[in-house]
Image (tube, rainbow, N blue to C red):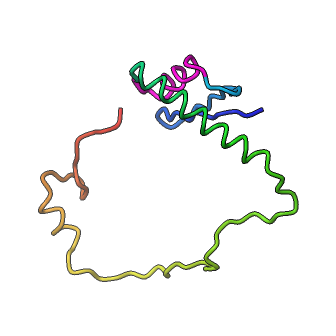
Amino acid sequence: MLFLAVVHGQRQSVILTFIEVMSKLTRKAVLKLAHLSRLKLSDEEVDRFAVELTHILEYVETLNSVDVRGLEPTYQITGLKNVTRGDEIKKYQAQPKDLLASAPAAKDGQYKVKRIVG
């Protein structure tokens, strides 16, 4: 049995909705996924996504059927370990006040922009 998780962020909370997937994803299931994802789909898109998502889920079912007992998980393949730089204070040519001077709007030492979320 396979479950498809749809994640929908709503402010700071995340809603997980699970839809049981049979051998074929139905038009009704695609419409529910679209609704939960806040997507408006045309009839042609609903039909196309039903087919495409069904193929994807069939592939996932195939992957789920592979026997991986005894195999070590692969987290990365390059062999590199902890390739990060140390935290160092660097003196740059531009100062924050100079950069803010070229901004269209600034407030309390920060760029002021239009609200884009909710």
Where, by quadrant of the figure, is residue 4 drawn? top right
Where, by quadrant of the figure, is residue 99 drawn? bottom left
Comparing 101 with 6, the one in front is 6
Comparing 10 with 26, the one in front is 26
In this picture, residue 29 sits left or right of residue 67: left
Measuring 41% from the left and 23% from the top, which residue is drawn there?
A: 41
Q: In the rendering, at what x and y percent does residue 43 appear? A: 42, 18
Q: In the rendering, at what x and y percent does residue 31 appear? A: 51, 20
- Classified by dominant secondary structure, the portion drawn in magenta counts as helix
In this picture, residue 38 sits left or right of residue 116: right
Q: In the rendering, at what x and y percent does residue 80 appear? A: 61, 80
The answer to whether residue 38 is magenta is yes
Q: In the rendering, at what x and y percent does residue 17 appear? A: 62, 28
What residue occupies the far right of the structure in this picture?
70
The part of the chain drawn in magenta is: 26-40
Compared to residue 65, the image places residue 47 above or below, namely above
Measuring 21% from the left and 73% from the top, which residue is drawn there?
A: 95
Measuring 55% from the left and 29% from the top, which residue is drawn there?
A: 51
Compared to residue 105, the image places residue 5 above or below, namely above
